[in-house]
Amino acid sequence: MSNALKWFKSSYSTEQGGDCVEVAIAWHKSSYSTPDGDSCVEVAACPTAIHVRDSKIIGGPELRLAPHAWAALTGWVTR
């Protein structure tokens, strides 16, 4: 899976394209994922949410967590 930026059109942009603001997130593969792709967990951090996905499932679901919830989860799993 590529770490290319994924662009999203802002909800404040117009349908006609006159006021187009786009934002992007970059996905990063977890250091616990295997190089051969068997266990691919990717994370993208944004100011208001942390996005988590299984990169083996193309177009699959994403888990979105508030930054404080992500901190609590990662603190809990590292114990």
Image (cartoon, rainbow, N blue to C red):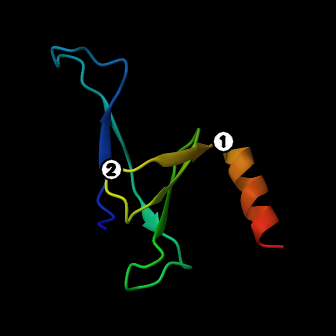
Q: Quadrant of the C terminus?
A: bottom right
Image position, residue 47 (x, y; %): 56, 42
Q: Is 49 placed left or right of 7 in the picture?
A: right
Q: Quadrant of the N terminus?
A: bottom left
**Residue sticking out furthest to the right:** 79
Q: CA distance from mark 2 to mark 1?
A: 22 Å
Image position, residue 63 (x, y; %): 55, 47
Relative height, residue 13 to residue 59 (above, below): above
- Quadrant position of residue 23: top left
Name the amino acid, label 1.
Ala
Q: Number of numbered discs present?
A: 2
Q: Which mark is residue 22?
A: none
Name the amino acid, label 2.
Gly
Judge by depth and name the residue closer to the eye, 76 or 44: 76
| Residue drawn at x 32%, y 36% as measured from the top left | 8
Q: Secondary structure at mark 1?
A: loop
| Residue drawn at x 33%, y 64% as measured from the top left | 3
| Residue drawn at x 29%, y 19% as measured from the top left | 13
Q: Residues within 10 Å of mark 1 (few under 14, many from 20)?
A: some
The mark lying in front, picked from 2 and 1, is: 2
Q: Residues within 10 Å of mark 2 (few under 14, many from 20)?
A: few
Q: Secondary structure at mark 2?
A: loop
Q: Which mark is residue 66?
A: 1
Residue designated by label 2: 59
Image position, residue 25 (x, y; %): 40, 49
| Residue drawn at x 37%, y 21% as measured from the top left | 11
Q: Is 69 placed left or right of 49 in the picture?
A: right
Image position, residue 33 (x, y; %): 50, 78
Q: Earlier in the sequence, mark 2 or mark 1?
A: 2
Judge by depth and name the residue closer to the eye, 71 or 54: 54
